[in-house]
Amino acid sequence: AGAGSTLGEQQRNDLVTDLKKAGSKFANKWVMTGGNHDLGDVVDGANLKIYQDFWSKQPFKFDPDKVLAGSTFWYSAMKVQSQLVFSLTSQFYWTGGGVAAASNDDRAKYAKLQDEFIDDILAKNKDFNSIVILTHIPPFMADIDETHGWANWNLELRKNTLSKFIEQGKPITFVTGHFHGTVYSEHTFQSKSGATVPMQIIVTTAVGTTIHWGGNEDFTPATAAQVAEAPTGFEAFKTFIGNNFGLKDSSIEKAAFGVIKFNSGGFNKGASAWMSPKGQSTPIHTFTADKHV
C-alpha cells in the first residue's frame, strides 16, 4: 500500500510491532530502503515526508559509526569490513507508467541528489574491495540494455548510475526485491581503464507472497526480463497471470492503488492456484467475483 493510504499506515504499525518483538538481536543492523509500496510509484514530496516522518522516529538504525558523511534518510553509504555498502532509493530511477512518472519534478530532483551523493562517496573512499548496493527495484534482469518496465530502472538513468560503480573496477553485488520472485544473474563489464568488473544481481522474493509469473516457480534472467519489461505491474499481471489462467482481458481492470479487480464471470475455475504455496493445494487467497485482491 502507498505511504499515504490508510492501509499503508496500518502495515507500518504492524511491522514496527513485529520488529520490536525481535528484540535487541538486530540492534544497529537496520537499513531502510524505500520502495514503491512505501513511496508510491510516482515519487512526490508528500509521500517522501510521510515515510521519513514515520521511520525516523523508530528505534531502528544502522551502526552510526559505520555510516559515511553525506548519508540521508533516502540514500546512505557505510563501510562494512572491506565492503562499501550503499542503500539507494530505486524509485528515483523508475519512470514507467506514463508521462506523469517520467516528468515528475520530485523524482528528478532526488535522482540528481542521489547521483551526486554516489559521486561524492566514491571520490572520497578508495579503500574497499567490493561494492554492495541495497535497493528495491533491480536495475535490470538479464541485460543492461533491456527495455524499461515496471521491474527495472529507466534505461538512461540505469546506465548512467551503473557506470559510476563500474568505473571503480571492483566487484559489484546488487540485493533487490520488488519482483515477488527469486532471480540470480551474473554479468561482466569493462571499465574505461580496462578492468574487468563482475556484477551479480540478486532479486529476492517477497516476505508475503511469491508470484508465479507465467506459472513458473523458478526464473532465468531472460524469463524474468520478459515480465519486468511490461510497462506496468498491472500489464505484467494481465499478461503473465491473467492470460495464464484464462482470464479475459475485459474482466480485469485497474482500481485505486494499483490493485486488480475481477468482474463477474471473468475467471475460470482454479485461477487462484497461482497463490498456493509450493506443494499445497489450498490457495492462500481465493478470488471472488466483484471483490478486490
Image (spheres, rainbow, N blue to C red):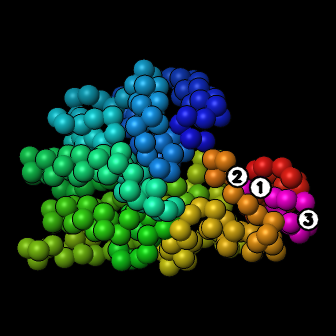
Three-letter residue code for mark 3: Gly
In the rendering, at what x and y percent does residue 48 appear? 42, 36
| Residue in the foreground of this view, choosing between 123 and 280 | 123
Query: What numbered label is drawn on residue 261?
Result: 1
Crowding at dot 2, Cα within 10 Å, few <14 / some 14-19 / many 20+, comes out as few
Residue 134 makes an appearance in the image: no
Q: Earlier in the sequence, mark 3 or mark 2?
A: 2
Do the residues bearing badges 1 and 2 touch, measured as CB atoms within 8 Å? Answer: yes
Answer with the quarter of the image where residue 235 lies: bottom right
Instruction: Indicate left or right for 67 with 249 as reference.
Output: left
- Is 68 one of the magenta-colored residues? no
Instruction: Indicate left or right for 49 with 41 as reference.
Output: left
Judging from the image, what secondary structure is the residue with disc 1 in?
Answer: strand
Determine which residue is flagged by label 3.
265
Three-letter residue code for mark 2: Ala
| Residue in the foreground of this view, choosing between 127 and 242 | 242
The residue lying at 19 percent from left, 36 percent from top is: 70
Q: Quadrant of the N terminus?
A: top right
In the rendering, at what x and y percent does residue 138 appear? 42, 61
Disc 3/disc 2 C-alpha distance (Å): 18 Å
Instruction: Indicate left or right for 175 with 8 as reference.
Output: left
For the image, the number of numbered tags is: 3
Q: Is residue 81 above or below residue 10?
A: below
The residue lying at 56 percent from left, 41 percent from top is: 2
Determine which residue is flagged by label 2.
255
Q: Is residue 283 above or below residue 169?
A: above
Magenta residues?
260-272
The residue lying at 30 percent from left, 63 percent from top is: 157
Nearer to us: label 3 or label 2: 2
Judging from the image, what secondary structure is the residue with disc 2 in?
Answer: loop
In the rendering, at what x and y percent does residue 56 appear? 39, 25
